[in-house]
Amino acid sequence: MGGILSSLNTSYTGLQAHQLMVDVTSNNISNASNEFYTRERVIAHPQAPLQLGNLNVGTGTTVDSIQRLHDEFAFDRYTKAARDHNFYKTEFESLREANSYFPDLQNVGIYNDLEHYFDAWKDVAKNPNNVSQKQVLVKNANVLTNDINTTKEKLLALQKTKSDELEAQVKDANRLGSQIAKINQRLNELEDRATLKQANELRDRRDELEFRLQEIIGGNVFKKNIQANNLVDSRKADFDDGYTFNIGHGFNMIDGSNFHPIVLKKDNNPEGLNRIYIRGYDFKDVDITDRIDEGKAGALLDLYNTGYSGTKTGKIQNYINLLDSFAKGMIHATNTIYAQSAAKEITGDKTSIMDFDALKDTNYKIHTGTFTLNAYNNQGDIIASKTITIGATTTMKDVVNQINANTDDNKDNNSLNDFDDFFHASYDNNTKQFSIRPKSSTSGMSVSIKDHDTNFIGALGLNRFFEGNDASTMHIARIYQRDPGSIRAHLAPVSGNFEIANMMQQLQYNKVEFYDEHSNRQEMKISDFYQYVAGSVANQTQDVKTTLDTKDAVMQAAKKEHLSISQVSVDDEMVNLIKFQSGYAANAKVITAIDRMIDTLLSIKQ
């Protein structure tokens, strides 16, 4: 039944509702600067009316819930855009640093060092007996090799830094993932779909953690039974009752309140770089290194991964491989020429080849073909030549046997003036070092070796000018660093011969073989291949920068869309505050009027 007390209750419900609206508005304003706070709205509707005869009399208002204005689909677009942006931002910052290792401005960088190095050989050719010119050659060769060594060291250090950075990021990702799982458990305890009871602050906190986690590790979030509510806002879609966070295209990191940590291991590969695993319910770790290709972690792996155990090769590792290819190609081409200079003996690098291994099947890039050995007397005349053949199945033992074979090399039916009469070749499985030495130390004989596209000389480092086998170990032979005057500019061992020096300075114009890590061969000039290496870094850096600009524009658009729905507008909230305060005051006046009516009624009764 209606009455004056019913009227009092009606106004009281309005007073309570408007007080709550003022509280919520105040909370919105206090969190206006927090990007991940979602503005809230009090949802209220009229209470069921009283039936007074043929009349329906309103009984006030009732509050259904306090709901946040959140669109899960807009937020998902923003999260994915931020994830992609973070991937390319991380890549660009690292590639920009790698690109700085290849300056190649005027008078700076390896390209400039190459010019000075070949100019020094040209000067040696002009005056092959001038020791000071050879000293300049050693100095320029050292500058070149030091720059090559340093560049690779910087790339390796950058690679290690990115691996360490992943370690820090994964620790943070595990912390965030653990917190999300705990929040999911609390949401299950606090929320009730039937009564529209929502833990808005917990959901805001989960959104922030989820956003940061996707920036780090990428992945996708799957939420069940998301509800739209057009009575509140046409852009509202929220209040899920299921949660799965999936990384690596199929591995659950968070499944409701269950959390599966990411594990890093770096002691299972020779480079000691971090590889990434996910730990399942059975506590077994699954390698997902190649499957993490999003967020900052994906970018770091895409940068530093070495390709170990068949995984993808990262960009930094690719630059290291290219620089190694450049160094190896230059070492082999230089040594192939320099080995033609007659010396007292020929000695190669220590190898890993067994004497029964087919040379063509080893990792030394030795091809089928021939090379020629020349024996010189002390007047510089060739007194014996022998051609050695390398076939598809030729072994090191076969090469040694061919050299030592008693053959009529001069075609004069004289068995005492052939190559095997002056020199002896050897190779054993203990030292694994190929050598050709004179049979008599007092004969004054010299030997040279000329390759015909087998790469035997360069691969084994025979009579080398450069030592080492990659960009880290490349350096001029130590004997020439100690004694520059012993550098041989001659082909034949006679005064005034400078054919080797000429061939060396001409090398800059010749095409040289370069091999990648998969043994694919390219033929380019030395300077052209270096420009290809430096250009690869520069072009990739620019491509990533262009993509980053695009991703940044997409992210800003997605962020604007998300914030237009969820961000607090202080101006709007101030208007609401005035409106709700006025409603509160009006309800208070009604209560005051009813109080006076009750006083009047009581005075009449008295």
Image (tube, rainbow, N blue to C red):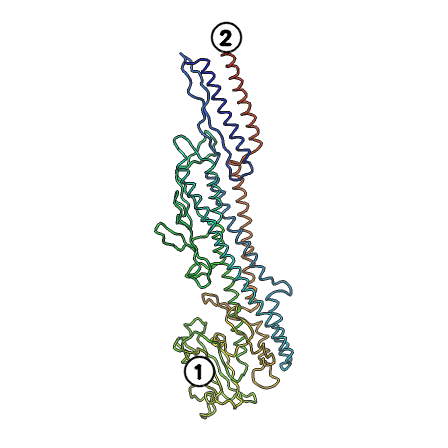
Q: Position of residue 366 (x, y in %)?
A: 45, 74
Q: Residue at x 42, y 51 (%)?
A: 262
Task: Decide which of 543, 272 is in the foreground and name it.
Answer: 272
Q: Which residue is mark 1?
A: 426
Report which quarter residue 432 is drawn in.
Answer: bottom left
Pointer 1 local density, CA inside 10 Å: few below 14, some 14–19, many at least 20: some
Q: CA distance from mark 1 to mark 2?
A: 131 Å
Left or right: 214, with 495 as reference point = left
Helix, strand or loop for disc 1: strand
Q: Amino acid at mark 1?
A: Ser
Q: Position of residue 491 (x, y in %)?
A: 56, 82
Helix, strand or loop for disc 2: helix
Task: Decide which of 233, 253 is in the foreground and name it.
Answer: 253
Q: Amino acid at mark 2?
A: Ser
Q: Nearer the viewer, mark 1 or mark 2?
A: 2
Residue 263 numbered tag: none
Task: Decide which of 500, 144 is in the foreground and name it.
Answer: 144
Left or right: 400, with 30 as reference point = left
Query: Which badge, 1 or 2, comes first in the chain's sequence?
Result: 1
Residue 290 seen in the figure: no
Q: Residue at x 46, y 39 (%)?
A: 73
Where 598 sits versus 453, above or below? above
Where 75 sits versus 549, above or below? above
Q: Quadrant of the N terminus?
A: top left
Where 471 sits versus 94, above or below? below
> How many numbered discs?
2
Q: Position of residue 421 (x, y in %)?
A: 46, 89
Pointer 2 local density, CA inside 10 Å: few below 14, some 14–19, many at least 20: few
Left or right: 193, with 133 as reference point = left
Q: Residue at x 60, y 62 (%)?
A: 103
Residue 603 numbered tag: 2
